[in-house]
Image (cartoon, rainbow, N blue to C red):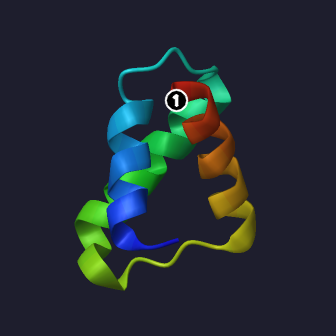
Amino acid sequence: MDLQRLDWVLLKAQTMVLSAREERFVNDMIERRERDGDAVRVSGAQEDWLEAIAARAA
């Protein structure tokens, strides 16, 4: 997942109604993005989950 897409998904997710589990996941990803910057790594499973959230935002 490119960083521009990651940032867009994370911003959109903050405006959505999420389950408690999704909210924890998104908050963790935001913290990692802020901490690691451009070096943040997103696994395939994490990308799938983020894209599933993004699909609901569109």
Classify residue 44 as left or right of residue 28: right
Q: Secondary structure at mark 1?
A: loop
Classify residue 30 as left or right of residue 35: right
Instruction: Pinpoint residue 20: horizontal percent, then vertical percent.
Output: 61, 23
Q: Residue at 24% across / 62% down in the picture?
A: 34
Instruction: Pinpoint residue 6: horizontal percent, then vertical percent.
Output: 42, 59
Classify residue 23 as left or right of residue 8: right
Instruction: Pinpoint residue 36: horizontal percent, then vertical percent.
Output: 30, 76
For label 1, count other residues whose C-alpha is less than 10 Å away and answer few (under 14), some (14-19) or many (20+). Answer: few
Amino acid type at circle 1 is Ala
Task: Decide: is 36 above or below 11.
Answer: below
Q: Residue at 56% across / 44% down in the picture?
A: 25
Q: Residue at 71% across / 56% down in the picture?
A: 48
> Which residue is the site of mark 1?
58
Query: From this viewpoint, which residue is outermost toward the top?
Result: 17
Could you say which is closer to the camera, residue 58 or residue 43? 58
Task: Decide: is 17 above or below 41.
Answer: above
How many badges with numbers are in the image?
A: 1
Classify residue 8 as left or right of residue 18: left
Could you say which is closer to the camera, residue 6 or residue 36? 6
Task: Decide: is 37 above or below 51.
Answer: below
Instruction: Pinpoint residue 13: horizontal percent, then vertical percent.
Output: 44, 33
Query: From this viewpoint, which residue is outermost toward the front?
Result: 58
Q: Residue at 43% across / 46% down in the picture?
A: 9
